[in-house]
Amino acid sequence: MAKNIVIIGSTGSIGKSTLDVFDKVLKDYTLLGISANENVEELKKQIKKYSPKYAAIMDKTKEKELKDATHGTKILSGYQGLAQLASLKEADIVLISVVGAVGLIPLMAAIKAGKRIALANKESLIIAGDVVKAAVEKYGAEIIPVDSEHSAIFQCLHGNKKEQVKRLIITASGGAFKNHTLAQLKKVTVTQALNHPTWKMGKKITVDSGTLMNKGLEVIEAHYLFDMPYEKISVVIHPQSIVHSMVEYVDGAVIAQLSNPDMRLAILYALTYPDRRTGVIPPLDLVKTRTLEFCEVDLEKYKAFALAIKAGKEGGSMPACMNAANEIAVKNFIEGKIPFIKIAEYVEKVMKKHVKIKTPTLEDILKIDLKVRHITQELING
Ligand code: MG
């Protein structure tokens, strides 16, 4: 069935992959709206190519430039613009693929409008999982995961009884440094950290994959998306990134979802669910793959992973604190200001200082997010 789609974050890695899926197999869909953070050049190109009815730019200072360069497309801007775009009456599916805590604003707007949401932004669920869950229920919205692991679990749960799930098994590639020792990790460069062995992704998530913070965030994400206690979520390292995650049932059956590592499959499924379409990713050749390996996560080496799980289990405002500290630490690492190994150290320091709020409101969370960013940056500046 043809649908109107909105992409919040169309110039990023997931956004571009979504447009590729759109070009290849969703010709019957309409691209209703797109948005960018600040990449006005790319957004202009996309507007020219797709002539969407709406486009939004987060950076308000670039609104005029965008307006002058386009016609026929209504231009929105700032947080408010993103929220407007996410709640358009004509929209059937809103894909949210912006990176970081900022995703919470369009997410809440889409939820309040009762939309089907294809969610690629994990940070919003991490920092405000309880608030998001309550709102989804209240407004009758629907979240379809786009993160490859959660898309896999979503598919493995399909047609089965949730109360008969024994545990979710999330796979992790191990990132760029899976063969590094703790000593070698101390010398990691930015270029090395941005070079992921199996997945092509944005900068922040690629660094998070290296520290395995990304996997910790995904455990929290799974906890909220599938309403699963932390005791029932485990993680295994799987370097080939072919098995995207699994669900174990009470009878001992383990159902896995496999494919070539390509984000476009999870994007496609989220946009066509419960239907499937052909023609986006190449078929999986298991004979060529030959080996599928699995091993345990080294908690000493991947300190950031352990910290994320700790924050998730503590709950309240702790995940929001952990996430904000990590976003700032990663940003400083990418800018060459702190070594790779220090990312987790800063996150830990900031978490130790945080006075947890047990049941934070959305306003509390946004305040904590800002405050922790500031505190983390000050700590890094020394
Ligand atoms: Mg993932």
Image (cartoon, grey):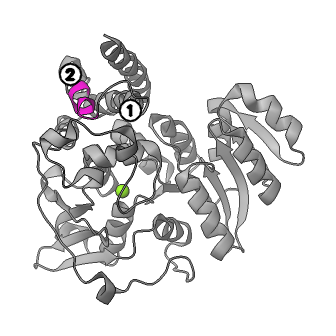
Which one is in front, 237 or 324? 237
What amino acid is labelled 1 in the image? Glu
Q: What element does badge 2 sit on? A: helix
Part of the protein shown in magenta = 340-346
Left or right placement of residue 174 versus residue 28 in this view: left
Q: Position of residue 157 (x, y in %)?
A: 30, 72
Q: Quadrant of the N terminus?
A: bottom right
Read off the residue under disc 2.
349
* Main SS of residues in magenta: helix
Horizontal arrangement in the rendering, residue 280 relative to residue 379 (left or right): right
Residue 258 in the image: state x and y as whole percent.
33, 77
Q: Residue 316: in sight, yes or no?
A: no
Say which residue label 1 marks: 327
Q: Secondary structure at mark 1?
A: helix
Is 12 colored magenta in this rendering?
A: no
User: x%, y% of residue 99?
Assistant: 48, 42
Above or below: residue 3 compared with residue 301:
below
Q: Position of residue 29 (x, y in %)?
A: 70, 69
